[in-house]
Amino acid sequence: MRGCTLLQCPSKNLLEEGHNARNGGHVESLIDQSPSVPCFEFLFDFFQKHPRREIRRGAQVDDPMLRALQLAWEGFGQTYPNPPVGAVITRGGALVGEGYHRFAGGPHAEIEAIRDAGIVVDKGPESFENASMAVTLEPCSHYGKTGPCAERLAALHFNDVQIATLDPTPKVNGKGVNILRDAGVCVEGLGDTSEYARVARALMHPFWVRERSAKPYVIVKIAIGHKGTMCNDSRGALPITSDASRYMVHQLRAKVDAIAVGASTALRDNPCLDVRFGIGAKNPERRVLTRSHGFDCSTLKMFEVKAKDRGKSKVMVDATPGGFALRELAREGITSLLVEAGPTLFSAMLKASVVDELWVFQSPNTHEGIGVQDVLAENAMQLACVRDVGPDTLQVYLR
Ligand code: AOF
Ligand code: ZN
C-alpha cells in the first residue's frame, strides 16, 4: 500500500501481510495524497467517455467494477454527508443485482444491489454462494443509520468482494475488509495503478477533503470574455458564455452539494441557483456569502422556492470568505461547494487559498471588466486542462 500518511490505517499490516488464505490482494487505499487532477473535471471526462448502458438481469457484465463506478456517479452530489457508492452483483459473469446509495439515511449501495436481486435482506435462507460483488467503497462495519454492510455480505455467503478503495473514516477503515475475510469471503483490491482505483478515489475525494480538512471541496467557476476580463458592472445579468457552457454549469450544479454566490452577484444577477436544462437531480443547497449582517434577501429569486426546496437557501455572514462559511458548511455535512463567483469573491477566495479547482469559461465575446490573469498568477494557480465547450473554452486550474 502506498503512502498511509494522514491516517494510521489499522488495516495496513493486515492487508499487506495477507490476513488469511483467501486474501485476494491488497485493497487500494485513498489515504494517498490528493489526486493531482481536478477531481470534478476528471470525473466528468471519465463518465462522458464511459456512459452506463442499460442491461437486463441475467445479461453478461463485461466489467462489473466499471458498472459499479458508473452507478456511484449516479449518486454523486445526492448523498451528502455520505459518500457516493455503487455496487454490482454477478454470478458467472451475469448480472444478478445492482444499486447505489441514493441519499443519506437510505440503504447503502450493497443493500440496494441485494434488494435489486430480489432478496429481502435478513429474511429467508437465500444466499449468494458463487456470487461476486464489485463495490466502489469498502463495505461499512459500523452501526450507523443502517447496519454494517460487511456483516450482511458475510452472512449472505458471497464468494468474493472486489473493492475499489478503502473507507477512510476511522470507524470503518479496514474493519469492513477484516469482517469479510474473517468470514472466509475473498476480498480483492484493484492495485495502486489501476485507473478505476483513481476514479473511485476521485468519487470519494470531496467526502475525504471534508473529513480531513473540515471544509468542503471547493470549485470556483467564473466566466470571462476573450481578453480575459470578468464583468463587474452593475447593469444586471448579461450572459457572457454560450448555452453549451451554461448547460455544463448546470451539469456541475447537479453534482455538487451546495452552491454559493457573493452578495453583489446575488443582487446584480439575481440567480435561481437551481438545476435546469432537464438535468434530473435535486437542487443543491444555496448560500449567499456576505460581510453584512443586514443583508436583505427578500427580493432574491433563490429565496422564492418551491416547497421541496424550502429552507435550502440561506445567507451566511462571513467577513473572510473561506473562513467561517466553509467550516460551517462542513459542519452541516456538505462535501462539495460550487462558488459562482464575481470578481471580488473570486480574488478573495484565491487569496484565502481555499480553492481546490477553478473552472474558467472563456467566451469569444468582448466586454469590459477586470483582468483575471494577474490574480491567477499571484495565487499560483496551475492550468490542468483545456477543452472546447461549444464556441467557448473551458480552462481548469488546480491549486
Ligand atoms: C457503505 N456503503 O453505500 C456508503 C457507505 O449513517 P450511515 O449508516 O448511512 O453510514 C454512513 C457512513 O457509511 C459514511 O460515513 C461512510 O463511512 C459509509 N458509507 N458505506 O458500506 C455505502 N455510502
Ligand atoms: Zn454500509
Image (cartoon, grey):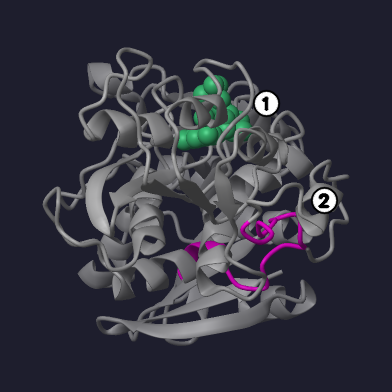
Q: In which quarter of the image is the C terminus?
A: bottom right
Question: Percent x, y for residue 272?
Answer: 31, 39
Q: In which quarter of the image is the N terminus?
A: bottom right
* Labels 1, 2: front one: 2
Secondary structure, mark 1, is helix
| Residue that mark 2 sits on | 12
| Residue that mark 1 sits on | 331
Q: In which quarter of the image is residue 234?
A: bottom left
Is residue 254 at least partly visible in the picture? no
| Residue placed most toward the observer, 292 or 162 | 162
Residue 145 vertical position relative to residue 386 in the rendered view, above or below:
above
Magenta residues (range) = 24-41
Question: Percent x, y for residue 378?
Answer: 78, 76
Residue located farthest toward the front when viewing the structure as drawn = 21
| Residue placed most toward the observer, 291 or 126 | 126
Label 1 vs label 2: CA separation? 29 Å
Q: Which secondary structure class fits the magenta region best?
A: loop
